[in-house]
Amino acid sequence: MKASSQPAAGLDVVIVGAGFGGLYAIHKFRQQGLKVRAFEAGDGVGGTWYWNRYPGARCDVESMEYSYSFSNELQQEWKWSEKYAQQSEILRYANHVADRFELRDAIQFSTRVVSAAFDSASSLWTIRTDQGDTVSARFFVVAGGCLSLPRMPDFPGRDSFQGKLYHTGTWPHEGVDFTRMRVGVIGTGSSGIQVIPRIAEQAKQLTVFQRTANFSLPAWNTPMPAEYEAWFKAYYPARREKARYSSAGIANHPTPDKGALEVSDELRAKVYEAGWAHGGPGFTRIYKDILSNEKANETMAEFVRNKIRQKVKDPAVAAMLTPTDHAIGTKRICVDTDYYETYNRDNVKLVNVREHPIEAITPKGIRTTEKEHELDAIVFATGYDAVTGAILNIDIRVDGGPSLAEKWAHGPKTYLGLMTAGYPNMFMVTGPGSPSVLTNMITSIEQHIEWIADCLRYLGQKGIRRMEAQPDFEEAWVRHVNEVADTTLFPRANSWYTGANIPGKPRVFLPYVGGHGVYRMKCADVAFKGYEGFTLQA
Ligand code: N01
């Protein structure tokens, strides 16, 4: 669809985003006969996988599971080429879905939603975009992604740099050739850990500016084994059903019944070795108490620290790369291919910016409190304003009242992560207070879209014009989200899960840690009780 400033009459739903959430929302809502329009900032579909084109970008949930389950034909016909698909293949898949289900005509590309205003008299949302569009719809569905608003730390002198600056989350479509360049990478989260080995292969010199050493597990990525694919496809519906009631929305994750301290040291060591040999993020779920018991966590953390020491030849560099300030898994666990080994290369240098912080970007490079590092290019792998960033980037108001950003000034408040009191007929896909980023995002996206679709059908059948979360149910849900988080080690780490990466962002544990399956049943129960906790008005 071409950008247009023509108002769209009679829209039922306006959707923000054409990533995996937006695409499925278009399909699902249209199947119910609703009239929908989606606005997408990029000039193509795919969301995260449209923007994150940095070398090494790939998913760390296995391809057979990081894919839609809503169509058995789709999951049977699509062939993933690797155990963990790379960005370009996932983007191809998103495009295939958009074509196969004829979704493109509902999407207006290269258009960012800037404001949304609800009018109680008409029960309509009016949505405005940066392209001058003004459209009205009965419902507003924000599917802008949990990790989509890139964060560039505001180092003094950033604009003075004479080389090139990149952010992993807005990578140039034409790619970047780092041959013969001196490159600096700031950040060692999942993006940094993926991009660093690839840049090291190409650049003349790579300097990594690390503030916090992170735990990373091996992916052991391989081309897709034919028999594995065949087995998975033979049992696909059952595997998906298992994922839907699992904790992380992933069928292949372990479901332990024992704690790490309930077994002998010898057995635990063997289990960790086997888990390491298998690789992937399921490792942190080998024992049921890894993310809730400090001592249990320490057994796993120390196992991984030893692996780092074995991989990195220079003991001083190994020490710098060894995390000691947080429990394993409480900052988002990373999964890598040759990350630690990269530091054995002669052209790779590690700088500890916890010890010597970055003072400024200079015309020639990066100056820390120790020295100036001369560079031709700087890559920011510095992350995102997570979970709430893309929602609050839109000025959202009801009857000219306070913005949602004002309501959430001390942290987001939602009922089930789906709606927020005082903002009727607005749904969030994988919003704060839902399992979202702690799970396979596609499992969580499907659950949310299906819940919203069922809800819209119900409202239609009952002739209800306005639906709103009740403040007391919202308070109770927020309290529950915090209480469950406080039974774990998660809130103790300075991670983006808590908003700690954004100066001034309220410190709140953003996702719901109670598990996807438990949450799914709670949402189903709420719907079954006639949308308990929501006010419905004809
Ligand atoms: O971002 P991050 P990301 N000076 O916030 C550092 C998903 N993802 O883009 O830890 C110096 O994790 C910061 O240091 P510290 C996944 O959910 C998935 O890597 O704050 N350093 C940290 O090292 C992931 O968790 C995949 O001390 C600064 C880094 O920048 C999420 O996206 C791949 C700094 C930011 O790490 C975000 O990952 C990629 C400063 N001023 C991403 N500011 C896969 O599926 C920040 N840093 C594999």
Image (tube, rainbow, N blue to C red):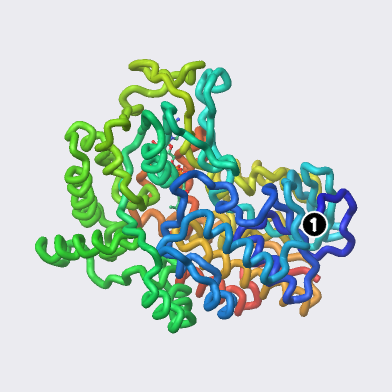
Establish whether ligand 1 lies closer than 8 Å to the Cβ of label 1: no
Indicate the quadrant of ligand 1 in the picture.
Answer: top left
User: Where, by quadrant of the figure, is residue 259 drawn?
Assistant: bottom left
Vertical position of residue 334 compared to residue 494: above or below? below
Q: What percent of the width, then of the height, locates residue 513? A: 43, 60
Vertical position of residue 120 compared to residue 149: above or below? below
Vertical position of residue 1 compared to residue 53: above or below? below
Screen quadrant of the N terminus: bottom right
Q: What percent of the width, then of the height, locates residue 226? A: 39, 74
Q: Which residue is mark 1?
A: 1
Amino acid type at mark 1: Met
Residue 394 lies left or right of residue 491; in this view the side is right
Which residue lies at the image location 48% right of the left edge and 67% below the top edge? 80
Vertical position of residue 109 compared to residue 425: above or below? above
Asked which secondary structure carries label 1, the reply is: loop
Which residue lies at the image location 51% right of the left edge and 16% below the top edge? 363
Nearest to the observer: residue 288 or residue 37: 37
Q: Which residue is farthest front?
A: 180
User: Where, by quadrant of the figure, is residue 401 drawn?
Assistant: top right
Nearest to the observer: residue 426 or residue 70: 70
